[in-house]
Image (cartoon, grey):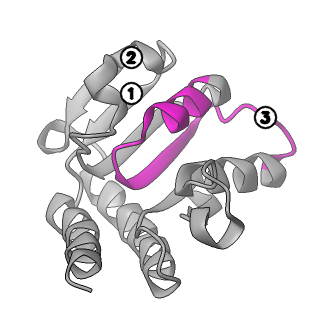
Amino acid sequence: MKYINFEDASDAVSDEIYMKEALKEAQKALDQDEVPIGAVIVCNGKIIGRGHNLTERLNDVTAHAEMQAFTAAANYIGGKYLQDCTLYVTIEPCVMCAGAAYWTQITRIVFGANDRKRGFSIHGNDLLHPKTTVISGVLENECAALVTSFFRNKRNK
């Protein structure tokens, strides 16, 4: 697993474009009163999977944005491995989603904001496939603001 800061990434422009698509997915979650996290999976310049949190709607703790996107992408390509693909997700994946990313053998994970309470990196980076590259901090402020305002509004109700 290779960890790169966004400022050092060679695909910075396209990473921002696809992160904006993940933010659109996060907005869909917010509109459904779900934790606003969104994800897209890109392969060869094409979005092949989209997802946003559906844990409340489906009453399923595993219905995270990444899991929805993995399933959509695997269905699109007709296989379970997502080599040569990139996962864009607004918030750092949790341990469950990092484990799923490991099994898909996804090439890159690009995320917006760190999750200092539930993100995979607090448990070490060995949760990801050794060939996976991670880029963090893409549109970090926008990604963090959605989740922060969501929970602030929940506490003030």
Quadrant of residue 52 within the rendered picture: bottom right
Secondary element at tag 3? loop
**Residue at 20%, 83% in the rendered image:** 156
Judging depth in this view, the residue of 28 and 152 nearest the camera is 152
Residues in magenta, as a range = 77-102
Secondary element at tag 1? strand
Verify CB contact (< 8 Å) between mark 2 and mark 1: yes
Verify CB contact (< 8 Å) between mark 2 and mark 3: no
**Residue at 73%, 50% in the rendered image:** 71
- The answer to whether residue 97 is magenta is yes
Mark 1 closeness class: few <14, some 14–19, many ≥20 residues within 10 Å: some
Residue 133 in the image, given as x and y percentages of width and height: 38, 27
- The answer to whether any part of residue 153 appears in the image is yes
Label 2 sits on residue: 1
What's the residue type where badge 2 is placed? Met
Residue 133 disc label: 1
- The answer to whether any part of residue 44 appears in the image is no
What's the residue type where badge 3 is placed? Lys
> Could you tell me how far apart the alpha carbons at marks 1 and 3 are, in whole angstroms?
19 Å
**Residue at 45%, 35% in the rendered image:** 108
**Taking 79 as reference, is 66 left or right?**
left
Residue 81 in the image, given as x and y percentages of width and height: 73, 31
What's the residue type where badge 1 is placed? Thr
Looking at marks 2 and 1 on the same chain, the residue that comes earlier in the sequence is marked by 2
Q: Is residue 11 above or below residue 59?
A: above
Residue furthest out toward the right: 78
**Residue at 56%, 32% in the rendered image:** 101
- The answer to whether residue 63 is magenta is no
**Which quarter of the image is occupied by the N terminus?**
top left
Q: Is residue 117 above or below residue 30?
A: above
Residue 80 disc label: 3
Looking at marks 2 and 3 on the same chain, the residue that comes earlier in the sequence is marked by 2
